[in-house]
Image: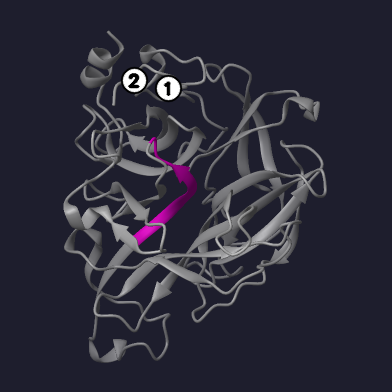
């Protein structure tokens, strides 16, 4: 499929894509991992049309940097959005949505257990609320999920057709651990939400779990904080796999239901954005098993560790990537198009230029 015919890049041209969009980040905070873009309703009265949030790995004070933009070209730093006093904890992957029921803004994010240095310990999804998209968001505690492990991260809230009712309903996809599989690691599940987004309204359904070599995060990983999972003291390890960063609510030009994810390790060039297709009967196909990647490190010249995007418009993602070998992650825009087999993909600069010509 070409880039003409209704593709919406939110008014951006090719020169606005594939480059850092926040060259001057929050003071003393350079990393922009896991960016999430909120476009507010036109009737909201907010100062900006768009708000960008990202992961915060600092260990004190308020967290989650927020930036505002009216044209997606200039972003103003607005401070830290989340009011918190949780010491020695990291706050990952915020997802911020306008709650139609309460007319307020809900932030879904995960937080590690306070007062300990390992950010993997106790990472659980939480929700915070605010009257304005820039905050201050006030934490409401852990989100009431049905969990088998002490780990839940990377929320994405979206609307789609509920197969049981036939109407549109809110859903939440998030990342959990899978310990009792041939390949151990994290994958993605989905629940339907109550209309006010306050709790799950269904049991979790598995969307995708580790099954492939390309989803390997770290070989021979020792995880001693996972007490009882292995005999870590005796030297046991696991080959840990990673599928994270879900994006739900996608519909292809042919009408197929899709989800995006990121797999591999965000630390290196194994990181990639994948796609999962759902058939009308609910059958799930992980396109990584067919060798298809939406975006892979090395596909875009000069950008590595590309992944963990969020959806800006149906044809535009904001992703993170490294623009120098040892650089911090920076947010950038990349188009999302569909190929002749009805599969999503991100074109490189030259391909997009040809499609727009």
Pinpoint residue 2: horizontal percent, then vertical percent. Answer: 29, 21
Q: Is residue 212 magenta?
A: no
Residue at (26%, 13%) from the top-left corner?
353
Magenta span covers which residues?
243-253
Pinpoint residue 85: horizontal percent, then vertical percent. Answer: 71, 58
Label 2 residue SS: loop
The quadrant of the rendering that contains the N terminus is: top left
Q: How much space separates mark 2 and mark 1, taking CA atoms?
A: 6 Å
- The answer to whether one can see residue 60 in this image is no
Say which residue label 2 marks. Answer: 3
Q: Is residue 231 left or right of residue 289?
A: right
Name above or below for residue 1 compared with residue 154: above
Name above or below for residue 240 compared with residue 318: below
Residue at (51%, 20%) from the top-left corner?
10
Q: In this view, does 51 lie to the left or right of 284?
A: right
Label 1 residue SS: loop
Q: Are marks 2 and 1 in contact (CB under 8 Å)?
A: yes
Q: Is residue 212 left or right of residue 41?
A: left
Q: In which quarter of the image is residue 219?
A: bottom left
Residue at (48%, 70%) from the top-left corner?
205
- The answer to whether one can see residue 161 in this image is yes
Name above or below for residue 164 compared with residue 302: below
The circle on residue 7 is 1
Pinpoint residue 319: horizontal percent, then vertical percent. Answer: 41, 37
Label 1, residues with CA under 10 Å away: few <14, some 14-19, many ≥20? some
């Amino acid at each position: 499929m070409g880039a003409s015919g209704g593709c919406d890049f939110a008014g951006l041209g090719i020169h606005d894509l594939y480059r850092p969009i926040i060259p001057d980040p929050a003071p003393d905070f350079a990393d922009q991992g896991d960016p999430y873009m909120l476009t507010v309703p036109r009737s909201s009265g907010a100062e900006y049309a768009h708000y960008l949030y990202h992961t915060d790995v600092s260990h004190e004070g308020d967290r989650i940097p927020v930036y505002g933009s009216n044209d997606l070209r200039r972003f103003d730093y607005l401070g830290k959005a989340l009011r918190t006093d949780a010491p020695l904890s990291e706050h990952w992957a915020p997802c911020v949505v306008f709650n139609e029921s309460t007319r307020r803004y809900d932030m879904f994010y995960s937080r590690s257990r306070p007062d300990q240095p390992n950010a993997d310990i106790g990472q659980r999804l939480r929700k915070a609320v605010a009257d304005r998209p820039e905050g201050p968001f006030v934490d409401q505690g852990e989100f009431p999920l049905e969990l088998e492990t002490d780990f839940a991260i990377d929320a994405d809230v979206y609307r789609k057709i509920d197969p049981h009712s036939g109407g549109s309903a809110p859903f939440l996809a998030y990342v959990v651990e899978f310990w009792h599989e041939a390949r151990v690691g994290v994958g993605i599940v989905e629940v339907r939400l109550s209309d006010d987004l306050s709790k799950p309204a269904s049991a979790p359904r598995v969307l995708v779990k580790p099954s492939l070599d390309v989803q390997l995060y770290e070989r021979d990983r020792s995880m001693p904080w996972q007490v009882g999972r292995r005999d870590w003291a005796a030297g046991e390890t696991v080959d840990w796999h990673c599928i994270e960063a879900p994006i739900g609510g996608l519909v292809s030009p042919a009408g197929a239901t899709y989800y995006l994810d990121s797999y591999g390790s965000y630390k290196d060039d194994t990181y990639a954005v994948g796609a999962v297709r759902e058939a009308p009967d609910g059958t799930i196909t992980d396109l990584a098993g067919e060798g298809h990647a939406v975006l892979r490190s090395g596909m875009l010249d000069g950008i590595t560790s590309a992944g963990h995007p969020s959806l800006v418009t149906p044809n535009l993602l904001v992703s993170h990537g490294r623009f120098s070998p040892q650089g911090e992650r920076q947010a950038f825009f990349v188009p999302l198009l569909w190929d002749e087999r009805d599969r999503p993909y991100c074109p490189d600069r030259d391909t997009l230029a040809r499609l727009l010509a």
